[in-house]
Image (tube, rainbow, N blue to C red):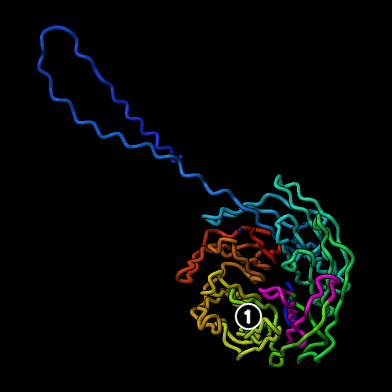
Amino acid sequence: MSGVNRRRFIGMGALAAASAVAAAPGPVVPQSPPRPQPAAEPSVPARPRAATRPLFLGTYTSAAGGGTGVGLASYDPATGAVSGTGTIAGVENPSYLAVHPDGRTLYAVNEQQNGGVTAIALAEDGKHRVLGTRSTGGAGPTHLSVHPGGRWLLSANYTSGSVAVHPIDAAGALGERTDLVAHSAPPPGPGQTGPHAHQITTSPDGGHVLAVDLGNDTVYTYRLDTAAGTLTQVSYARLRPGAGPRHLTFHPSGAYAYLANELDNTAVVCAYEPETGLLTPGEPQPTGAGGAGDSFPSQLVVTANGAFAYLANRGRNSLTRYAVEAGGGALRLLDTVPVGGDFPRQLGLSPAGNLLFAANQRSNSVTVFHVDQDGGGLRSAGRPFQAPVAVCALPL
């Protein structure tokens, strides 16, 4: 990142003991009428408590007070309560995480000068195993994603401004890099010394790969050769100079995407053509979190029904709520709400879409919110979960 530091019975035991008292033989003795007994309530089976689900946490192991690897936690999918369960040690600076489509392998960037990507085999008993690390061929990788086919891992080298491709074998392990593409044109934006690839992702239809470069205010579109693992550029979209595009998120329709611009503190709705991969940015619009230099947007997420979008704002430490309108073609600013932490680096929605997790880098915490998927409201799920230099929260 440029200009600022980089980088959660009832036991219905109502047993009606109806004691029937038999009358002893002999003369009939008048007795008070029996008190009416409450009707026995039908037995109600206990409602099973929802099983906790895994939450993986990214950190900087080289930072003061940072973690010692990938953080392990679990969360209650109903309440949002988070509890820690340990660490996957031996993974350096795992600042961004992604999971394979089959759910059996976790991948982490190693954000350091000699950048790498690490594969971790996930086990149901919690005995996760590091499969190995491969070089990204660049410096400071900040983002990775798995191609929907599950055979290729894509990564973005921020410091050196390049994107890489690695093959994934049947066990989830990574092979040697099959491609490395440097962003050499167009020229860097104002105040930049070169390209800074910050994200690489695949379009919802799987047809194109898009790389967001903060340094030269550009989003590149590639085709991935799924046999050879190579990228071919087909187009690029330029943002206004000094925008600093950081993270792109697609609308579920696949016809639109939304950009968080870090440097000029704006959001941009982009039209997207799945057939050609052409991305067309619209006009920048406010985040509701101050002006440029006051707040630094990090990431947008969109609800699965495509009705609402949320943006994390570092500096102002807030979440912007947008209503998504015009079938995905417009964002209407609703308001901003406090994130409950300092410097929200990354957001993650739970698979059910009812919980939103924010990784707060400078407060060493993860905050969790209940998401009203009908009205778009956010409600705190309780006290923040403490996690060292939390920069990524991946709920499964």
Q: Nearer the viewer, residue 52 or 254?
A: 254
Q: Is 124 above or below relative to 366?
A: above
Q: Nearer the viewer, residue 78 or 93?
A: 78
Q: Secondary structure at mark 1?
A: strand
Tell me where residue 61 sits by quadrant.
bottom right
- Specify whether 185 is left or right of 271: right
Crowding at dot 1, Cα within 10 Å, few <14 / some 14-19 / many 20+, comes out as many
Which region of the structure is painted magenta?
Answer: 201-230
**Quadrant where the image shows the N terminus:** bottom right
Magenta region includes residue 210: yes
Report the residue at 80% width, 57% height from top.
Answer: 172
- The amino acid type, in three-letter code, at marker 1 is Ala
Report the residue at 14% width, 6% height from top.
Answer: 26
- Specify whether 148 is left or right of 40: right
Q: Is 248 above or below relative to 109?
A: below
Instruction: State the image coordinates of residue 104 (x, y, percent, origin top left).
Output: 73, 54
Tell me where residue 93 sits by quadrant.
bottom right
Report the residue at 75% width, 46% height from top.
Answer: 127
Magenta region includes residue 213: yes
Instruction: State the image coordinates of residue 298 (x, y, percent, origin top left).
Output: 66, 76
| Mark 1 lies on residue | 257
Q: Nearer the viewer, residue 176 or 19?
A: 176
Instruction: State the image coordinates of residue 211 (x, y, percent, origin top left).
Output: 75, 79
Q: How many marks?
A: 1
Tell me where residue 12 sits by quadrant.
top left
